[in-house]
Amino acid sequence: MREETPTVRVALFAGMAEAAGARSVDVPWNGGTVHDLRQAIAALFPVVEPLLSKSTFAIGDRYAAADEPVPAGADVAIIPPVSGG
């Protein structure tokens, strides 16, 4: 029997979801940091790369630093920059 590659489910919002054509994506994931995940998403969806560098990542219900590990199976959200007045 063939093992499935672990994944991370990533929720996308606003312009990033629109650009990717989905509100969430499953990213193949063998482990790494938020920084590594950012690079993996940019490779899969080059159209969202400009927004990734300006966005904040959350794992579960808390914000995550770039050097924080992301476990396989984690629920991740990318919070885009917010502007307003």
Image (cartoon, grey):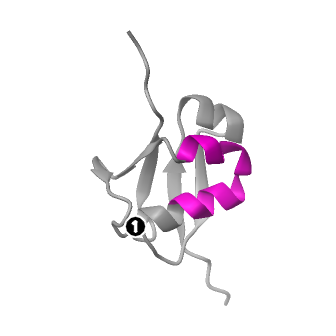
Q: Is residue 12 above or below residue 15?
A: below
| Outermost residue, bottom side | 1
- Residue 85, x across and y down, in percent: 38, 9
- Residue 15, x across and y down, in percent: 61, 30
- Please tell me in which quadrant of the rendered image residue 22 appears: top right
The magenta stretch is 38-52
Q: Nearer the viewer, residue 18 or 81?
A: 81
Q: Nearer the viewer, residue 70 or 81?
A: 81
Along the horizontal axis of the image, is 59 left or right of 7?
left
Q: Amino acid at mark 1?
A: Val
- Residue 52, x across and y down, in percent: 55, 46
- Residue drawn where x is 67% and y is 90% of the image: 1
Q: Secondary structure at mark 1?
A: loop
- Residue drawn where x is 58% and y is 62% of the image: 39
Task: Look at the image and say whether residue 84 sits in the magenta stretch.
Answer: no
| Outermost residue, left side | 62
Q: Is residue 79 above or below residue 34?
A: above
Q: Is residue 4 above or below residue 46?
A: below
Q: Is residue 51 above or below residue 84?
A: below
Along the horizontal axis of the image, is 2 left or right of 56?
right
- Residue 48, x across and y down, in percent: 65, 44
- Residue drawn where x is 47% and y is 44% of the image: 78
